[in-house]
Amino acid sequence: MSEQNKYMMGEDRIPKSWYNITADLPAPPPPVLHPGHGGPIGPDDLAPLFPMALIGQEVSTERHIEIPQPVRDIYKMWRPTPLYRAHGLEKALGTTARIFYKYEGVSPAGSHKPNTAVAQAFYNKQEGVTKLSTETGAGQWGSSLAFAGGLFGLEVKIYMVKVSYQQKPYRRALMETYGAKCIASPSTETDSGRAILAAHPDSPGSLGIAISEAVEVAAKNPDTKYALGSVLNHVLLHQTVVGIEAIEQMEMADAYPDVVIGCAGGGSNFAGIAFPFIGKKLRDGKDVRVLAVEPAACPSLTRGVYAFDFGDTGHLTPLVKMHTLGSEFIPPGFHAGGLRYHGMSPLVSHCKELGLIEARAYHQNPCFEAGVLFARTEGIVPAPESNHAVRAAIDEALKAKQEGKATNILFCLSGHGHFDMQAYTDYFAGKLVDQDYDPKELEASLAHLPKVAAE
């Protein structure tokens, strides 16, 4: 192994701390509000759901937060993750751009999600927690928490969005292999699930509904805490190992990016790749365009409103200010299940309001077209969610070709699609439909946004 490859791949290159973007933002993010009295929420309000260490990270303004050694030891299984240059894709496109991708599919669960799952399991175990409840869309987060829970001896119960539960049986099998219990949501196990089924017996489910069920279980059982795979500050914090590594790797390649791209549902992999680069821009003036890419059928950043809203459909969570389609919004059952969330991370939303990021939305067929081209030129089959980032990277490369620019493009390939092959089968059979949300349903959902005095 060459000295350079050793440097790029060695365990000593795993970051020793996570990066907290709130330390560098020109304006602080809005407060989190209590769903009852409407005032700012306090640590005691969150204690039934999260261990105190994670609550502290949620509100921290420290720029760097040390990664515990037991977490770094587990990260050694797959970190640092590789950064590749997409030579084959560049050749196929005939582009003047250089395309790079940070590949998070090398983790045991096949995506970026274990970066935070391991950290959350560690902090819960430290506080004496024995059980975790959570939700999952496509199953990447559920399988990651199942993996992490197994390592720390925690029981894990996962409410999986019903349409994904039905579409992705092998994701369910993976969660069960790691020792977790997986339940289709909405379910009859919780009050919030039963309420949805009473009103909509054929509901395909949504992340908002699954969150309500998982939160309810944690709130009602003292031995259980709730774990979230995206959206919240501490989750995005843990994902910044992706961007921290990528900065060093891109600098070694002498190709600091002109544009950084990530798919965006709740915001975790996007923030993971983007926030460290935004931080360098804010601190050092290192200019970069940052592009969040979302599904056209669930377009919170491009079609939602920036307002305080519940994070779940059952209105059990605190109120956060985010780009939202309304907590009652149920997106169509498209294949990128991990992006079927009604809201965007408050921190990502705040960055959008500050003009630090751009947003773009695509339908699923152009994204699968991009994923197939990527697979045939680079050898990796991307997850349906990741295909959104691939699509945007290709479009940016074609734009560079048209303009004759030597643009450096970096995107996060957040996971592989080995458990999503039915989606590719449907694509090849011409069965994928580019679904649009119902404007009337969106209007009705937004009409029920909570009234908040802080606005």
Image (cartoon, rainbow, N blue to C red):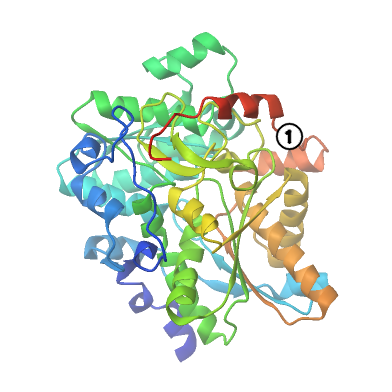
Specify whether 47 is left or right of 388.
left
Asked if 11 appears above or below 320 in the picture, the reply is: below
Identify which residue, 137 or 378, lies in the foreground.
137
Q: How many marks?
A: 1
The x and y percentages for residue 436 are 73, 34
Q: Residue at x 34, y 46 (%)?
A: 31
- Location of the C terminus by quadrant is top left
Figure quadrant of residue 14: bottom left
Specify whether 383 is left or right of 371.
left
Asked whether residue 2 is in view, the answer is no
The x and y percentages for residue 174 are 46, 40
Asked whether residue 316 is in view, the answer is yes
Figure quadrant of residue 6: bottom left
Specify whether 48 is left or right of 80.
left
Q: For the residue labelled by badge 1, is the local secondary structure a helix, a strand or a loop?
A: loop
Asked if 433 appears above or below 266 in the picture, the reply is: above
Specify whether 338 is left or right of 56.
right
Identify which residue, 277 or 214, lies in the foreground.
277
The residue indicated by pointer 1 is 436
* Residue found farthest to the top: 198
The x and y percentages for residue 74 are 31, 60
Figure quadrant of residue 177: top left
The x and y percentages for residue 329 are 57, 28
Q: Residues within 10 Å of mark 1 (few under 14, many from 20)?
A: some
Q: Residue at x 29, y 69 (%)?
A: 64
Tell me the kind of residue under disc 1: Asp
Asked if 54 appears above or below 139 in the picture, the reply is: below
